[in-house]
Amino acid sequence: MAKKILLSAILMLAIIIFLPVLASAAVQNASIVNDATNSSVTLRYEVDPINAYIENAAGNPGQVVLQVCADNATADLSGKYGGFVYKTGNGNLFQHLAEKSGVELVQFSSCDASCCKTPTDYNLLSDYSVYPAQVYAIVSDDSAINTSDTFIYIPSANGWFEGYFSTNTVQSSYSQTSGNVTVDVTTAYGRKEDGSYTSISTDKNYLILGVCDIVSDLYKYNCTSNAKTNLTASGVSLYTGVVSPADTGIATKYYVIDGIASSFCIGPDLTVTSVSVNPSSVPQGQTVNITATVTNGNNVDVTQSFNISFFRDGNPIGYVTVAGLNAGSTEYPSILYNTAGLSSGSKTILARVDDASIGDCNNANDNSTAALNIGKTYQVLVLINGTASTNFPVPGRPYNVSIHVNDSDGGNVAALVKITEKNGINLFAPIQNLSAGKGVSPLAVAQFETDASGNANIALIPTGNKLYNPEYAYLNVSGYVGNYQLYLEVFDKTTGTKLQLYNGTLINELDFTLGSMTAVNPTAGQENSIFVYNHNSFVQQIIDLANQVYSSIKKWTGVI
């Protein structure tokens, strides 16, 4: 007998447990409809003096009813009661919105094979229907609302109280240790008949809040917490069901206010908020510093390492490893990048967070870009007597010098070239000591243009200066006028702008060297052996005239 009683109790318990599921399974959906047209109704908010969502106001039809559809309405809904409530998901909190003669639920008055409707004298009440909502329908066995009744979420397509809520940033309020978020509803807005929105002012305690997951049941949301509040109350703490989450995934949750849901994400959000290039405009060959601003913009700490990768026009530059990043924290990884070999023009620098093993609440903010502008640089090839070199063995003898100028994009350059000898033997203004630390520093400048192919051929005669030899150290020439220099510069021949030279590194000018500061006379066999560029076009005559000038100067000054 005891076994039979136990078996009967188990069977009865199974029936009790599954009866609500079987009953709700027969119901398909619910709608707010115009009784006259059977079309769904989006209710507008009626402003002062009513300040509510009610029938026959704000353009709303006069006969708004609840319609519930089922597999077999005649069998499943006949004799049942229905009504409207504010509710959120499967929580046990609710607020009724309509009555008939003070009764919260009314018996369905008209049914066909598919759907049943409440009577037209079951009306929304201005004291209750004060907030925007995606309301819930109820199917009950009696006229009183109980938590065991069947609650049916009504989607906006099936009619709703049109409007929205403003809240705090719920996502950022998430606590990893407690698993709670704070929902603070600051303002409610109802949509009026003219389509504009108005702020709703009320202290009615009819805001049903929940933190939920979307499910396929009739009640739409499976919630881990519920609360009832109003617009004037402070924020409500709600449990999400997610405590101490790992950084490897995310959880999408919904905070729901009177059936109106907004999603939020629990997890990391590694974000490249910006990338900077310093300097952002450089000549080709200069090294720049690229810095990314990387933030964990969400609510879960990243404890594992991750890389920030850098690219130029899609080509990898390198990466920097960041050793984790707490929620709300920022790091500034940077990398040096040498622009040698790049063509001129604007380049796109991209910094990207590589977080494949890390949860990411927003994949759209994983990279950021900046512009890097590369200016042309210029290379000069110098041939001295047919050999690539920048060294003149001795001063006081003529050399054939060939110059070729091209840019970093490979183009030949018609340019203005200046070759300057500073503190050489120059009789126009010889080196002179004027006073302590001051003197006359002579400059001799050879200025010429390259042709369209970037070429020029000239004769050059470095003079050197023996006063820089050790035996004249007592004169301290460099203390008055500086050192001897022989260098080449290139300029834009139209604008006169000095062009940036590059010979493996960026240089302001190309320096020449002299093998000696002392002129050497040719041997008997070497005399008359040099024929230089433009020999018969002024060069021979100038050398002859220079000899005359030197001879005259010696006679005038008495120098023997």
Image (tube, grey):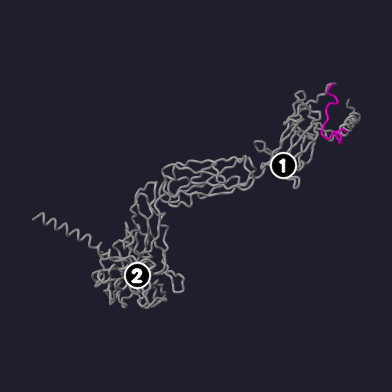
Q: Which secondary structure lies at badge 2?
A: strand
Q: Is residue 466 toward the left or the right of residue 336 in the image? A: right
Q: Nearer the viewer, residue 28 or 418?
A: 28
Quadrant of residue 99 within the rendered picture: bottom left
Can you say whether 168 is above or below 423 in the image?
below
Magenta stretch: helix, strand or loop mostly: loop
The magenta stretch is 525-540
- Mark 1, residue position: 412
Can you say whether 37 is above or below 496 in the image?
below
Quadrant of residue 157 within the rendered picture: bottom left
Q: Is residue 496 visible?
A: yes
Q: Which secondary structure lies at badge 1?
A: loop
* Mark 2 surroundings within 10 Å by alpha-carbon count, few (fewer than 14), some (14 through 19), many (20 or more): many
x and y percent of residue 186 in the render?
A: 41, 63
User: Which three-letter amino acid code belongs to the residue tagged 1?
Assistant: Asn
- Mark 2, residue position: 31
Can you say whether 151 is above or below 368 in the image?
below
Q: Is residue 120 toward the left or the right of residue 162 in the image? A: left
